[in-house]
Amino acid sequence: MASPATSTSYSIEKRPASYEPYEFTLPDLYRTIAKEELREDDEIREQSLAQMRDWIAKHPYIRKCRTDAAFLLRFLRFRKYSVPMACDALERYLAMRETFPSWFKQLDCNEPKMREILEDGVFTKLGQDADGRTVILFRVKLLNVDKFGPVEQGRMMALLVESLLEWEELQIGGFRVMLDFTDTVMKHYGLWGVTDMKIFMDAINRSYPIRFREINGAKFPKFAVSILNLLLTFASSKLKERIICHNTVLEMKGKFEKTLLPKEYGGELDTDELRRKFIKHLEDRRSVILALDDMDIDVAHYSSLWHQTNMVENEVEGGVAGSFRKLNVD
């Protein structure tokens, strides 16, 4: 996977005098995926970028925003080039960051807590499969829940998402997730309150331009099913449809090419080397990710977005097992 654009700074002027030209430099596989799945070609891309930039320039509540193609394309691709929907996603993304700064701003890979979670190896970016989808692995047992609560965990996820979205390959091909719950304990699941869950799932569902292709989980414990059901109360039906649960890790890893498996899972990848490589990427892009905080929107105008609830009381009381019967748990 090629590194993101080498720029280390981007203008946040909503009406810049000019825009840098964009050139599609990815392999033909991604040009094909972009065309067939996202309706993207050179003409549509340029037209959509121009429309989105005009919308930003005229927006009464957006004060400062990146308008470079590298940033705006993540929203256009997320919404398959529906410009109104891409604009809505961008608007919600900006409002979310301002509404919950303790979760989504000052995402610094050098912050001690962030650094420790990164070094612990909870997350590994494994590579790309034959269909161009980025594969990532979470080994949940490596998360130190005695030290890191929901906000630290959520901030780490936000940092990972922001950094992963810098790769155009991921914007176009989306990604597949491996979640290994082996040897987890109740504390891994019991720290999150309802408010934490709602903030996090709203970000995943509606605010971050993420193309989930699959979420594979293995060895999820029975004692935590009720908590998972509550979390999924806030998940979109589309996200639920992409969840695949496996009884064993062996069953889960069978869905992935062996070249994408770490040595611990019978493959050849060195997770320590991959971790160091990803941390180096975060260090290289640290200033770009921190500079996202300089974007600005009139957050007071959007306060009602997060005062509403999408939670139905009888669903919470009874769980959502009825809508998630395909769960296979340990």
Image (spheres, helix red, strand yellow):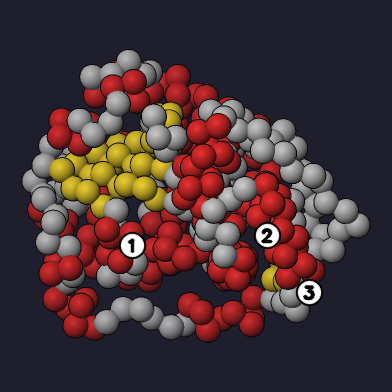
**Where 288 sits versus 249, above or below?**
below
Q: Earlier in the sequence, mark 2 or mark 1?
A: 2
Question: Circle 3 sits on which residue?
Answer: 58
Q: Say left or right for 52 vs 37.
A: right
Q: Which quadrant of the structure image shows residue 270?
A: top left
Judging depth in this view, the residue of 309 and 154 nearest the camera is: 309
In what element is the residue under mark 3? helix
Question: Circle 2 sits on which residue?
Answer: 48
Question: Circle 1 sits on which residue?
Answer: 238
How far apart are the two marked residues, 3 and 2, measured between alpha carbons? Answer: 15 Å
Judging depth in this view, the residue of 258 and 9 nearest the camera is: 258
In what element is the residue under mark 2? helix
Amino acid found under the numbered disc labelled 3: Lys
Q: Earlier in the sequence, mark 3 or mark 2?
A: 2
Residue 46 lies, in percent from the top left, at 72, 53
- The answer to whether residue 163 is visible is no
Identify the residue shown where x is 45% and y is 45%. 174
Residue 237 lies, in percent from the top left, at 30, 66
Crowding around mark 3 (Cα neighbors within 10 Å: few <14, some 14 to 19, many 20+) is few
Crowding around mark 2 (Cα neighbors within 10 Å: few <14, some 14 to 19, many 20+) is many
Crowding around mark 1 (Cα neighbors within 10 Å: few <14, some 14 to 19, many 20+) is few
Identify the residue shown where x is 91% and y is 57%. 17
Amino acid found under the numbered disc labelled 2: Ser
